[in-house]
Amino acid sequence: MEPTGGALARALIWSVSQAADAGSADSIALSRTSRPLGRGFCMTDQISIPDGWEPFEDAGFLNLVGPIHQRREADGVRSFAFVAQPKHANLIGVVHGGMLMTLADRALGLTAWDAAEGRPSVTIQFDMHFVSAARMGEFVELKPEVFRLTSSLVFMRGALRVADRPIAAATGIWKILDR
């Protein structure tokens, strides 16, 4: 029976479970449950951030979807990451593509600024290819790469990963501003 009345104030949450077929680690099976938003999964004191990561402070949009963490790699490039929380979930209970795109855009953009020696850079083209799902509680990270730098453009790419599992690939071009 379909929910009615007060159930309109409830969110449909799709729970994700690993499929039984051992040949495909990225296969997922979906089952539908209805429960109020904000209930169930709670990570308040359970978030485990790996050693070497520190909070990335951003008073803007990232403050709403974060926290975001950063780590300076041996080559000097900063990597960025977040722990997937319920506020990052889409309707099927995995991390929303918009959150993954937000992390990628900010990480690649900040790296473009660094490559441009601190000059502001803005996104002029951005592509994202999703290859696997990130699940609640997982630590999603991205190490940006500058693959071409001109006097006015920075060409970027990066892979979002959970440990060794690729989640998405991002590429883009950033325009270096003359301010």
Image: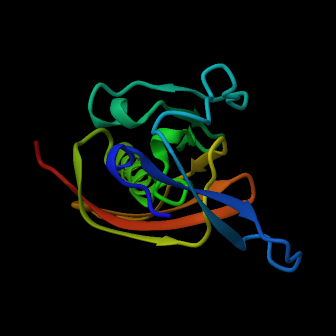
The single residue placed furthest to the top in the displayed view is 45
Q: Is residue 133 above or below residue 83?
A: below
Q: Position of residue 112 (x, y in %)?
A: 35, 51
Q: Position of residue 45 (x, y in %)?
A: 66, 19
Q: Nearer the viewer, residue 135 or 20?
A: 20
Q: Nearer the viewer, residue 96 or 176?
A: 96
How was this image coloured? Answer: rainbow
User: Residue 37 occupies which quadrant of the picture?
Assistant: top left
Residue drawn at x 78%, y 70% as measured from the top left: 19
Residue drawn at x 49%, y 49% as measured from the top left: 89
Q: Nearer the viewer, residue 65 or 158?
A: 65
Q: Give the side of residue 88 with respect to residue 136, left or right.
A: left
Q: Give the side of residue 79 with respect to residue 6, left or right.
A: right
Q: Give the side of residue 100 with respect to residue 94, left or right.
A: left
Looking at the figure, which quarter contains the C terminus? Answer: top left
Residue drawn at x 62%, y 36% as measured from the top left: 41
Q: Position of residue 100 (x, y in %)?
A: 46, 54
Q: Nearer the viewer, residue 10 or 89?
A: 10
Q: Position of residue 83 (x, y in %)?
A: 59, 38
Q: Is residue 122 above or below residue 45?
A: below
